[in-house]
Amino acid sequence: MVAPYRARNDRCILLQQRATALNQSARVTGRALCCAINFLVILACTAATQGGDNQQDPAAQEIKAGTSLLQQGNYPEAKVHFERAKTLQGKPTAETNAGIGLAELQMGHLEAARQMFTLELQFVTNDHARAQAHYMIGSAWLRETANGAADKEKLQAAEESFREAVKFDPLYDLAYFNLAYALLGQDRQKESDAAFRDFINAAAANPESARDLPVTPKSHVPQFTVTDSTGHAVSSDSLRGRFVLLDFWATWCPPCIRALPAVRQLSKFFPEDQFLLISINEDANQDEWQRFSRTHEMNWTQVWDQNSNLYDAFRLAPSGSKLSLPRYILLDQHGFVRRVYSGTDQLGLLMGQVVRTVRSEFDDRARH
């Protein structure tokens, strides 16, 4: 009787963690929020240029104030300013609809947000703007499914919106990421896996991932030897000759869980003689780590970091301070740390830069 109970309990844990990840992916934060606000600024500037407006235009000033308040996280006041701009303009515009929609979305007014972004689609004039509006509509649908029991029709609506987004902008990596979660919520695992792989490919092709490349060696990898979940030794010396991404995570870390399906696909992205992903768990309880990795079939290299020894060896935080997760460290084939990444707000940038860096190195070898 113990084994069936454990299986049912693991299934409950899996469903709870999936709901948490859905909720995380549906929220417009970090890079997605920054991109939305930046695009809103571009819309407003374009409208001002086309309309011959100047800095004294009252509607333009209201839009500027609303955008600033969005950046500050004051969504109710931001909405007020965009509504004033709409009244002053005497008609709805792409920028006022987008501003009101973003404020509504961040306040959790999901139906109102969808209505505003749908109206925005009537006024935008380029494919990236259309992709952005569809992405926001999909985010509202996905976030609604995360607020309670998954609703198949809402998940399908989210899926449709994200597919429209990537149709208009094939390099919109965040749309692929949320598309994958919409599919995962419908238990369409193979399609979800493919969408997470599309997320990685789009991130690598996105010009933004070329920012600050190439990543240059920064410091030597500290000497270490640990034992993985299969009982094999993993040492700093044994990792030479290929790129390695160290993924520091914990079962109690929602952003870590959110990134897990994409991390899984990255672990299979390159041959093992070119790239290895090692997930390093920071749970205090080893049993929690083992149960989680078993339930989620984490079949790439797994290490339990007892007492956070590796975390400290890489000096990821001052001695005695709290853990900050997730953290990712890219090591090169010569035993140097190339780059340290924090959090998942820029997960696409991380994935894109890792793929570009590994491809560049081994493509150069193939040419010579």
Image (cartoon, rainbow, N blue to C red):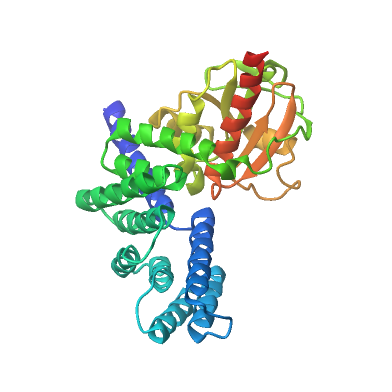
**Up-down: is 154 above or below 173?**
below
Taking the spot 37% from the left edge, 36% from the top edge, the residue there is: 195
Q: In which quadrant will I find the C terminus?
A: top right
Residues 322 and 126: in front is 126
Q: Quadrant of the N terminus?
A: top left
Residue 164 screen position, x and y as percent: 32, 48
Task: State the residue in front, 276 or 78.
Answer: 78
Query: Which residue is rendered at x = 69% and y = 21% of the image?
Result: 333
How many labels sit on residues?
0
Left or right of residue 160: residue 66: right
**Does 296 sit above or below residue 182?**
above
* Residue name at image x 30 percent, y 58 percent: 144
Q: Say if residue 111 shows up in the picture.
A: yes
- Quarter residue 103 falls in: bottom left
Q: Quadrant of residue 312?
A: top right
Asked whether residue 253 appears in the rendered view, the answer is no
Point out residue 229 in the picture as x, y percentages from the top left corner: 53, 22
Q: Residue furthest right?
A: 219
Q: Which x, y percent locates residue 260? A: 46, 37
- Where does the image place residue 263, in percent across and percent down from the top left? 49, 34
Report the side of 137 relative to 233 (left or right): left
Examine the image and state in which quarter residue 130 appears: bottom left
